[in-house]
Image: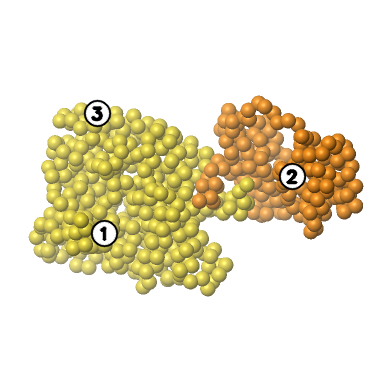
Amino acid sequence: MKKVIVTVLANDRPGILASVSGAIFQEGGNLDQVSQTLLETQFAGLFIATLTKDISIEDLQAKLRQTLAPQGMDVLVKPIDEPDTASPVPSEPFVITCFGPDRKGLVAEITAILARHKVNVTNLRAMFEGGDDPSRNLMIYEVDVPVSADTSALSGDLRTRAAELSLVINIQHRNIFESITRM
Amino acid sequence: MIHDREILTILGMLNNEHLDVRTVTLGVNLFDCVSDDIDRLCANIEKKIGGLADGLVPLCNRIGEKYGIQVVNKRISVSPIATIAAPFGPKGMVAVAHTLDRVARRVNVDFVGGFTALVEKGIARGDDALIAALPQALAETERVCASVNVASTREGINMDAVLRMSHAIKEAAALTADKDGLACAKLCVFANIPQDIPFMAGAYLGIGEADAVINVGVSGPGVVKNAIDRALEADPNMDLGDIAERIKRTAAKVTRIGELIGREVAGELGIPFGVVDLSLAPTPTVGDSVGEIFQSLGLISIGSPGSTAALAMLNDAVKKGGAFASSHVGGLSGAFIPVSEDLNIAEAVSKGFLTIEKLEAMTAVCSVGLDMVAIPGNTSVETLAGIIADEMAIGMINAKTTACRLIPVPGKKAGDMAHFGGLLGFANIIHVPNATAQGSFVTKGGRIPAPIHSLKN
């Protein structure tokens, strides 16, 4: 059975999830995982489904668009390849927080360093409301740092760049947050 | 996913509210070091501590860096030296103190505790030698801390030991007169001393403990103060029951950090994790003060009427939060009120809000006792012994730990300023009524019998 990922973008309003999940169900899709978020007024949803009917990706996308586009939704369907059989890279979860004055390219600057050190970002929340108030401009990266990574070099690179950008940066193992908040 | 608000709250505690791991203390059992030859004993002690503690400081720094939390102090506690070096006289005890000081410098820990005697029921030969050696040992070493347990709920108060300690304190002060009696800042007299305190000067490794163990002390008076301030800002009508609940929850969070760091250090060293001691331990820094909490609770100052009730509530809420968050809470766990180490408390003394009598009353409900209290240099041995005996009685009757860390500052009188430096801070010398009196009560000797409620078997 094929697995697909359906991406939906729309102006947020009540009923989007009902329409999308209903349309996927109509085409024989069984939902495996769903994640949705709101950024300002925009809805973004990711739906992973296993197809129980024999239908091509193109046909599925066309059918979903036919139902959902008139409701103001952009839909993209992609197949999910078989999972890589190679074992995942052993890694440790860290949380990187950056505060500081807003300027262009902050996410690009930080993520470039992370990419260079083969650090995988598992979650990013960023909010830039402009101005110099650090609490109104923050980035929270949840990342997986490979155990083979040179953590002091990574930390050094991040801190150096953060200082150049006038950012306050904290790099902490995720367990400190977990142990305090989950009892 | 961890919520943004949780992350930001914790970052605020770490970066703005002085939350830190105040100490990671490595307990080292020295019983397998004993010898009838003093040189061999000292060599064995140096070898054993060195072997276990060599990597302690870099390890704590690395783990602190990993979690973004400072491990401020790294310390060592050892088996009671009065027992370990029992065959030797005062000279031998001083030699052991020098050995401990040397190894502490070598492994770069800031203090080593355990120059200790347990004499609540009687003074054995080794105890006698250690107490005799105390003034010289503390004056000649930098990093050695001493404690003597003179009372317990089970055994009563050994008044002979109380008087001996009063003499020892006076002598230790005299030997360090040029530093305002600094040696006394490294000496605690206890009732009901716990075996696993990570904080100095009272840390030692009890004889019922493992060969080596990691105990952790976490602090954070600033975190508690800010939690109270935030709660009252959100709801100015919040009552004391709700505030106690807020303190309890905050204490639980702080304790979790100690548990995390302690377990990781112990795991890396391959030795057991002992306890977390969550104690609101101030430093002479604005925002890291226990005294400021009293003002957040609506009192004019620590020491004003209501302070004992406020401290009782604070101490209990901290204990409850700690007990919920860790299965192994130990040490002192509560609130410290060390006068010179807390800017706000020192100020309360200088402004007259806090007297020695009120301090003593408050120690009935805090987690330690008369801590870092500078008293006039001419306080008589008898008066000093009386103050100690009173404090021990509070501990004995209430089945709690109490301690005295009193500094009779040579050549200075009430109102003068005493400076101890660094974390030990500075304070106005507190007025002691009838300081020079020489009543005979404390010289009668013997033991004050244990209270009726000690008969539990």
Q: Which residue is mark 2?
A: A31
Q: Chain of mark 2?
A: A
Residue B108: x and y, percent?
Answer: 37, 36
Locate residue B400 relative to residue A104 in the image: left or right: left
Quick check: can you spot residue A15? Answer: yes
Q: Which residue is mark 1?
A: B399
- Say above or below: B283 vs B66: below
Q: Quadrant of residue B268?
A: top left
Question: Residue at (15%, 65%) from the top-left corner?
Answer: B437
| Quadrant in the picture for the N terminus of chain A | top right
Residue B240: x and y, percent?
Answer: 45, 70
- In the rendered structure, are the residues bearing label 2 and label 1 in contact, judged by CB atoms less than 8 Å apart? no
Find residue B327 and name its label. Answer: none
- The colour with which the image depicts chain B is yellow
Q: Are marks 1 and 3 on the same chain?
A: yes
Circle 2 or circle 1, nearest the eye: 2
- Of residues B369 and A69, the one nearer the viewer is A69
Q: Which residue is mark 3?
A: B43
- The colour with which the image depicts chain A is orange
Q: Amino acid at mark 3?
A: Ala
Q: Chain of mark 1?
A: B
First in residue order: circle 1 vs circle 3: 3
Does dot 3 land on a helix, a strand or a loop? helix
Quick check: can you spot residue B142? Answer: no
Q: Amino acid at mark 1?
A: Ala
Q: Amino acid at mark 2?
A: Leu
How far is the residue under mark 3 from the one under mark 2?
Answer: 70 Å
Does dot 2 land on a helix, a strand or a loop? strand
- Say above or below: B435 vs A156: below
Q: Are marks 2 and 1 on the same chain?
A: no
